[in-house]
Image (cartoon, grey):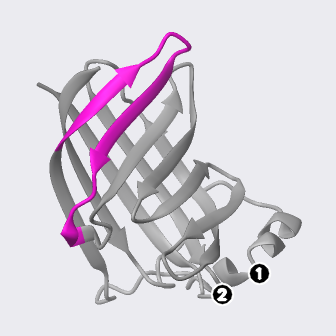
Amino acid sequence: MKSITLKITTRTYGDHMPPQAGDTDITKEEEDVILNSVEKIAPELPEDSDTDTIELVTVATMDFDADGRCTIAYRESELSGMEGTVTKLTFLSDDRSILSVIREGAVNSTLVLEAGKIHTGLYQTPVMPLEIATRTYRLDNTVTPAGGTIHAEYALRIGTVTATRMRMTAVVQPH
């Protein structure tokens, strides 16, 4: 396990972010899994559209186990609204097409990001559990033991709230 510097930038586009060149198509049946909420995403992102950006730079750990699974772990801050939560980004080094974002602590959830797929799960809050669903448009992962970048674009729905389009970039720099 090695210490790294992790810079994560997340942009939330509400329901305004358009599909991008290279987005992976999803069948209508898969789309129905998340109650068609991602179909409401506007076809074009207006130049003046509102976005919400959060940037976190923190010390984290990165470990590649004997099975080739990489785990990057960091503590959430008050800025994210999830203080008291440890977030883990995990993927297989020989199959970077799936990224799991696992949160444990004050907030518990697992997001699975896989280009062209919809995944559902639970978001455990102190009040009650909520269903979450992700539709991943793009996932690029160049992380190795020497560092790299993860870039994901996806729609996220929590409970019955209309899906919001997200862009997340994580830059990994070993010390």
Is label 1 in contact with label 2 (beta carbons under 8 Å)? yes
Q: Which residues are magenta?
A: 59-79
Visible in this render: residue 107?
A: yes
> Which of disc 2 and disc 1 is earlier in sequence?
1
Q: Name which residue type carries label 2.
A: Thr
Q: Is residue 60 magenta?
A: yes
Label 1: how many Cα within 10 Å (few below 14, some 14–19, many 20+): some
Name the quadrant of the N terminus.
Answer: top left
Residue shown at the point (52%, 82%) measured from the top left: 127
Q: CA distance from mark 1 to mark 2?
A: 9 Å
In the displayed structure image, the side of residue 105 where residue 149 appears, left or right: left
Q: Which residue is mark 1?
A: 35
| Circle count | 2
Residue shown at the point (43%, 36%) measured from the top left: 141
Visible in this render: residue 20?
A: no
Residue 32 on image: x %, y %: 82, 74
Label 2: how many Cα within 10 Å (few below 14, some 14–19, many 20+): few
SS category of the residue bearing label 2: loop
Q: Is residue 19 magenta?
A: no
Q: Is residue 102 above or below residue 62?
A: below
Q: Which mark lies nearer to you, 1 or 2?
A: 2
SS category of the residue bearing label 1: loop
Residue shown at the point (58%, 77%) measured from the top left: 158
Residue 131 numbered mark, or none: none
Residue 58 on image: x %, y %: 16, 47
Q: Which residue is mark 2?
A: 160
Figure quadrant of residue 162: bottom right
Magenta: main secondary structure: strand
